[in-house]
Image: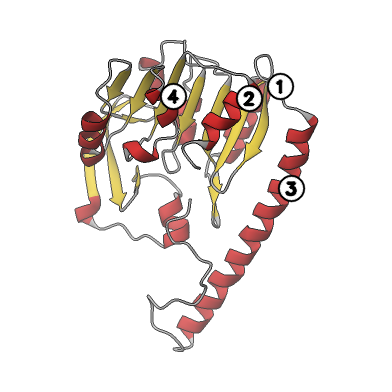
Amino acid sequence: MSNSLLYKKTIKNGFSPSHVAEVGVWHPDTSNILRYIESGIKATLVEPDPDSINLIKKTFTLGNVTLHEVAVCDFDGEVELCKRESSTFVSFLPDSPAITNDNCIVQETEKFTVKAVRFNSIDDGSIDLLSVDTEGSEWFIIKNLISRPAIVSIETHGGIYTNPYIDQLTHWFKTNNYSLWYLDDCDSVYVNNGKVTVTLLDRMKLVCSKVRLKMKFTRKVVSKKIKRSVFANGGCQPGATIDSDSNPSEG
């Protein structure tokens, strides 16, 4: 998602958060809450990767930012992570964008161990806008939420990837009085029904987005099957490009 799209849509809707949070920041310039941070709004960031942490510290020097240098899981202790380019994910996950879209086979040199905590040890109950992009472990954050943010942006799909905990996430949002506001190529953005209104135009755009994403998903599935077939018949070597529309880092 463009780091300005969420900001623009919330401003247009008339919603002004007082406390924003992002779990899985990666690079500061791609942060989904960058515009809010630049506006001086209180921000809580969570990022476990040492390289990203160094960039965040150099970039966000204002007093409105609190950084937690941990991974968020459904337990406290330590967890093994895998890092592949822009994707850092928990090693025991059943799926992640890197695994599904990029056929990632993790090497030992890509693994590292960090401190793990439950999100309820970070969440003070005042977060009113939350962005989560943890490459498959988003459910660990949502299931331990203390706050009930007005807006939640969460990575649920991308390419041929679907979040492995999509059923649990969908159920949680439904039972906690949230509605799906809009979709982009990777994220689902939900709003608390008591705090933000989903208009008829929003619903119409959502239908169009679902159709577009379904068509894109089908096209990529077919493309991947063709690649496998070509490779199996010796018509192409791994690494060659067949589908020019394919984006291996998508999702």
The residue that appears at 29% across and 48% down in the rendered structure is: 82
Residue contact between numbered discs 4 and 2, judged by CB atoms under 8 Å: no
Q: What is the CA distance from the residue labelled 2 to the residue labelled 3?
A: 19 Å
Q: Find the distance from the CA under tag 1 to the CA under tag 4.
A: 21 Å
| Gap in angstroms between the C-alphas marked 4 and 2 | 18 Å
CA gap between label 3 and label 4 equals 28 Å
Specify which label sits upstream in the sequence, 4 or 2. Answer: 4
Q: In this orientation, which residue lies closer to the viewer: 205 or 110?
A: 205
Q: Amino acid at mark 1?
A: Thr
Residue occupied by mark 2: 191
The amino acid type, in three-letter code, at marker 2 is: Val
The reply to whether dot 1 and dot 2 touch (C-beta < 8 Å) is yes
Three-letter amino acid code at disc 4?
A: Tyr
Marks 4, 2: nearer the viewer:
4
Q: Which residue is mark 1?
A: 197
Give the crowd class for mark 1: few <14, some 14-19, many >=20 residues within 10 Å.
Answer: few
Q: Which is more N-terminal, label 4 or label 1?
A: 4
What's the CA distance linking mark 1 and mark 3? 19 Å
What element does badge 1 sit on? Answer: loop
On residue 36, the disc is 4
Question: Which of the two discs, 1 and 4, sits closer to the camera?
Answer: 4
